[in-house]
Image (cartoon, grey):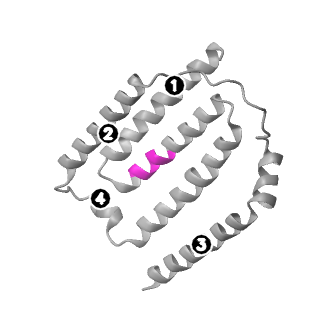
Amino acid sequence: MDTGTAIAFYILAGLTTISAIMVVSLRNIFHSVLFLVLSFAGIAGIYVTLNAEFVAAIQVLIYAGAIVVLMLFAMMLTTNAMTEGNPAGHLRPPAMLTAFLFFITVAYVGVVTPWQPRAASAPTDFSINGIADLLFNVYVLPFEISSVLLLVAMIGAIVLARD
């Protein structure tokens, strides 16, 4: 990894971390969703610095696009979500304790694990054409089942929004 890529990686990592902290610390739901978009875009940028362009494109399409639009629609359909913001809950201290314990656990595992470089394996085709071939030939049934499941979820959301 060259110096420019390393600098870009660390800037994107800092931007992503700060925006993720803003997502959970802001009381206005709309502003939280905007910082969530920034966090997703930062993660996509990190994928680009790691030479995973396909994963970055999927990150932008699915998370920064579809999931955030779904959240904005849910906020607009929910009464008073835009004006009242997040209510102060009684579960904030246990949630903070759980997040702290999770962070300590992950940090402990990261430090204690003996990380060994992986031996070179057989080259696999992770190009766009190779992934499309797998998706539309080998895994066509799970792909179609997931699309039907998403369609049913969308129809259910429309029915719930009408009531």
Tag in front: 1 or 2: 2
Q: Earlier in the sequence, mark 2 or mark 3?
A: 2
**Residue at image x 39%, y 50%?**
32
Quarter residue 62 falls in: bottom right
- Seen as rendered, the residue at the extreme bottom is 163
Q: Is residue 33 magenta?
A: yes
Left or right of 16? Residue 100 is: left
Mark 1 Cα within 10 Å, few/some/many (few <14, many 20+)?
some
Q: From mark 2 to mark 3, how far is it between C-alphas?
A: 32 Å
Q: Is residue 31 above or below residue 70?
A: above
- Closest to the observer, 124 or 99: 124
* Mark 1 or 3: the one toward you: 3
**Percent x, y of residue 26:** 31, 47
x, y percentage for residue 45? 60, 35
Query: In the rendered structure, which amino acid carries the disc numbered 3?
Result: Leu
Q: Which residue is mark 3?
A: 149
Q: Position of residue 6 (x, y in %)?
A: 58, 19
Secondary structure type for disc 3: helix
Residue 150, position in %: x, y?
59, 70
Q: Are marks 2 and 4 in contact (CB under 8 Å)?
A: no
Q: Label 1, on which residue?
A: 11
Disc 3 to disc 4: CB gap under 8 Å? no
Q: Residue, x 60% and y 47% (percent of image)?
A: 59
Query: What amino acid is found at the position of numbered circle 2 in the picture?
Result: Phe
**Mark 2 lies on residue:** 102
Predominant secondary structure, magenta span: helix
Q: Earlier in the sequence, mark 1 or mark 3?
A: 1
Task: Please state the extent of the stretch shown in magenta in the rendering.
Answer: 31-37
The local secondary structure at tag 1 comes to helix
